[in-house]
Amino acid sequence: MGQRNRHGGGPSVIAPAPAPARGGVDGGILGPDAPPPLVRVRGLTFARGSHLIFDGVDLDIPRGRVTAVMGPSGTGKTTLLNLITGQLRPQSGTIEVDGEPVHRLTRRDLFRLRMRMGMLFQTGALLTDLSVFDNVAYPLREHTRLPESMIRRLVLMKLEAVGLRGACDQMPATLSGGMARRVALARAVALDPMMILYDEPFSGQDPISLGVLMSLIRQLNDASRMTSVVVSHDVAETLRIADYAYLIANGRVMEAGTADQVRASRAAWPRQFLQGLPDGPARFHVPAPDLAHDILA
Amino acid sequence: MSRVLDHLARLGRLGLEVFARLGQAHWLLFGILSGMRDLAMRPRRLVVEVHRIGVLSVLIVVVSGLFVGMVLALQGYYVLSQFGAAESLGIMVAASLVRELGPVVTALLVAGRAGSALTAEIGLMKATDQLSALQMMAVDPIKRILTPRFVGGLLSMPLLAAMFSAVGVLGGYLVGVGLLGIDGGAYWSQMQARIDLHEDIVNGLIKSLVFGVVVTWIALFQGYAATPTAEGVSRATTRTVVHSALAVLGLDFVLTALMFGG
């Protein structure tokens, strides 16, 4: 499980963590007989300036499953999604989605691949000058030649699935945060993608919206047999709907396996993160000189 | 010695940054222009943008044109009457407006009203991931979002400048004929006789077309390159107005020298 990584560098609030508890299988969390993963990341290295975000990370996303990628804020979870979708290019390593090397694709091929991917942004990212209906219809109008009557039916079906058919004429500014994310979810699945990526879908949600989103993610995944990647730092909620999980920090994968395996991890860093313990290998304070020295200087 | 080297290094870095941004701006312009064919297949987007940039700027342009024309007539009458040439007020007002003030003031007004709005809109779309969402939907945001706005600004500017000049001439008439007592026939006939279609009107329209390109390009680039934060968008909006004003005034001198410099 997990994989062996080189030591991560760069400044971080989190102290360098000990080596992952479980061993790696060359980045795979699947057995040798499992079908090839939809996303295969090998030796991923990515830095912003002098800040190393990923240092030789290996990672597999299995097909047809919900895979969670968790870690503290600022560890590069959203960056990982941007790398998988080709919005960023790695400094070294390979990222393959459905066998295609994302980082080497031409713009046209990348766009063709993205038509088979959906992404739910943290903010929803709805187009604010379009109504709810037009937002969901947007990818259909852009990429299909379906008649408007057919588009209308499809959009209403997608909105019905997220419980917002009654809000189809509203503008995004009138929606609550949870509703906006559900509309964005309907838009993300409008073209029935093979994979959908969720960027912090639960952050800032009230309990009802959170429960609705959790069940929607699971139901959509099971009903349409798509692959889901959920990036989050909401441990309990994410592990409840995930089949597999990765914990990342300091540019490395700290733990990987099925949700149950990750939940049962005894290693110090995963335990501290999963249980939200104040003490452990992850330090609260940014490294600094002695307090007395600073104050009395 | 080391301080001098530090200053030189800083100057060098600044120069490199300026050239890098110029390069980015030209890449963006290339991307915008490559979206023209796409726009031709979706002309409704252009109509929407001409409405947003052009039609919604009509009020401020018309009101400003009226007052500028009236002030020109007052000032012109004061000078011309000292030489016994008050009857030439019409030609003075019209030439000033059509050649210079129409294109320049309209460009400054559009930069302040529509240019800053364009920058803020694109910057906020970037900050709220709307541009990233389009890319994730396999839609090129430059072609879909920026190209229609660019062409909308390009087409709106000459039309607004023409309105500014026309209303300014009317304002000059109201003051010159209505208030100062100049002969109405002289006001119009001198204008008709001396304003040349190519020399004055076409050159003025060319100017406003160039200003339309520059102002819209600057506004779109500043929005697209804005740091996606509240402060970043605010700075970008300010830069749009400042850079547009400087570019318009600088280009006006160059164009005037080329067109009317003899």
Image (cartoon, helix red, strand yellow):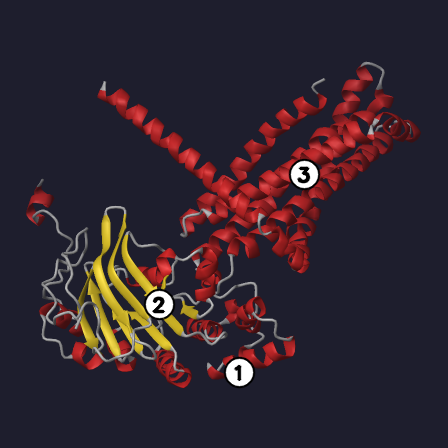
Label 1 packing within 10 angstroms: few (<14), some (14-19), many (20+): some
Label ID, residue A99: 2
Q: Nearer the viewer, residue B112 or A41?
A: A41
Q: CA distance from mark 1 to mark 2?
A: 31 Å
- Judged from the image, the secondary structure of the residue bearing numbered disc 2 is loop
Q: Chain of mark 2?
A: A
Q: In this picture, is A156 found above or below B76?
A: below
Apparent side of residue A171 relative to residue A10 in the rendered image (left or right): right
Label ID, residue B209: 3
Amino acid residing under circle 2 = Gly
Residue in the image at 73% along x and 29% along y: B99
The answer to whether residue A113 of the structure is visible from this angle is yes
Residue in the image at 7% along x and 48% along y: A290
Residue B20 x %, y %: 42, 37
Q: CA distance from mark 3 to mark 1?
A: 47 Å
Apparent side of residue A184 relative to residue A238 in the rendered image (left or right): right
Which quarter of the figure has residue B180?
top right
Q: Nearer the viewer, residue B207 or A153?
A: A153
The answer to whether residue B94 of the structure is visible from this angle is no
**Residue assigned mark 1:** A157
Which quarter of the figure has residue A266?
bottom left
Is label 2 in contact with label 3 (beta carbons under 8 Å)?
no
Q: Nearer the viewer, residue A35 or A295?
A: A35
Q: Are marks 1 and 2 on the same chain?
A: yes
- Judged from the image, the secondary structure of the residue bearing numbered disc 3 is helix
Q: In this picture, is A206 found above or below B34?
A: below
Residue A293 x %, y %: 7, 44
Amino acid residing under circle 3 = Leu
Position of the N terminus of chain B by quadrant: top left
